[in-house]
Amino acid sequence: AQTVTQSQPEMSVQEAETVTLSCTYDTSESNYYLFWYKQPPSRQMILVIRQEAYKQQNATENRFSVNFQKAAKSFSLKISDSQLGDTAMYFCAFTPNTGNQFYFGTGTSLTVIP
Amino acid sequence: GAGVSQSPSNKVTEKGKDVELRCDPISGHTALYWYRQSLGQGLEFLIYFQGNSAPDKSGLPSDRFSAERTGGSVSTLTIQRTQQEDSAVYLCASSLMGQGYEQYFGPGTRLTVT
């Protein structure tokens, strides 16, 4: 069975500081994709960053970067220079290479404090 | 270009009534997903359509739930004889297979069963 676990239901960070959100997953697949999605209070889910399992290099998108540890099945998200607009629910997601299903964690609610 | 749209944005219905939720995916996207998001929970996979293939219905919680996708584009999720536990936000997403499986989400339909 494929599972995604986010063990931090809520987190907060001071504006301009750095925060790391944790995610672990369980799968027997050898190739897959991992994602972080952001869901602001407006409800629209948007992609933050994507990682392909066969790539060793950690993905980076501006202030967002991941620490992908394949052996440990860990996929954490680091947000640098946090901004008020980063306040949202963050979901970690996994999909096997076949792409039939996406598996989402229960989310981490991040609040950026001015 | 236009993103994924869903209608209605909010729906309040009485227990026992049937409801239909609509999703218009991004033009050209062959894959379409339905999810359910209950308060404080992650996303629960419901059903997946890919092109003309038979849909993956493995996530539908009961036979009261059904979905169809006409012409490989618009999709309708139907819930018959609604129950209070059906109250949730129903999210639709589409993706262009082969593009790293990134999903584009609609704004969701908030369903309230009274």
Image (cartoon, coloured by chain):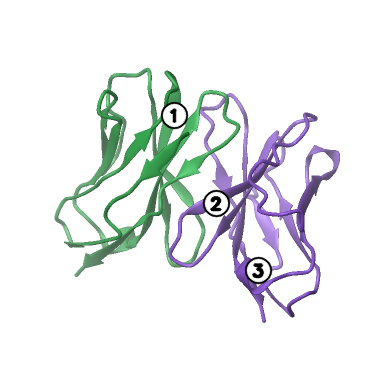
Chain of the residue displaying label 2: B
Give the letter of the green chain: A
Q: Can residue A105 be seen in this view?
A: yes
In the drawing, what numbered circle is on residue B9?
3
Q: According to the image, label 1 marks what residue?
A: A33
Which mark is in front, 3 or 1? 1
Front of the two marks 2 and 3: 2
Mark 2 sits on what residue? B44
| Residue sitting nearer the eye, B2 or A65 | A65
Please, which residue is most extreme toward the right here?
B71
Vertical position of residue B80 compared to residue A46: above or below: below
Chain under numbered label 3 = B
Residue at 58% from the left image edge and 60% from the top image edge = B107
Quarter of the view holding residue B112: bottom right
Asked if residue B93 lies left or right of residue A57, the reply is: right
Q: Position of residue B97 (x, y in %)?
A: 62, 28
- Looking at the image, which is closer to me, B6 or B2? B6
Chain to which the residue tagged by mark 1 belongs: A
Cα gap from disc 2 to disc 1, whole angstroms: 18 Å
Identify the hue of chain B: purple
Which amino acid lies under the numbered mark 1 shown in the image of this protein? Tyr
Q: In this view, does A3 lie above or below B7?
A: above
Q: Point out which mark residue B51 bears.
A: none
| Discs 2 and 3 lie in a common subunit | yes
Q: How crowded is mark 3: few (under 14 residues within 10 Å), some or many (20 or more)?
A: some
Quadrant position of residue A70: top left
- Secondary structure of residue under mark 3: loop
Residue B29 visible, this angle: no
Assign a secondary structure to mark 1.
Answer: strand
Residue B114 position within the rendered picture, expressed as x and y whole percent measured from the top left: 67, 82
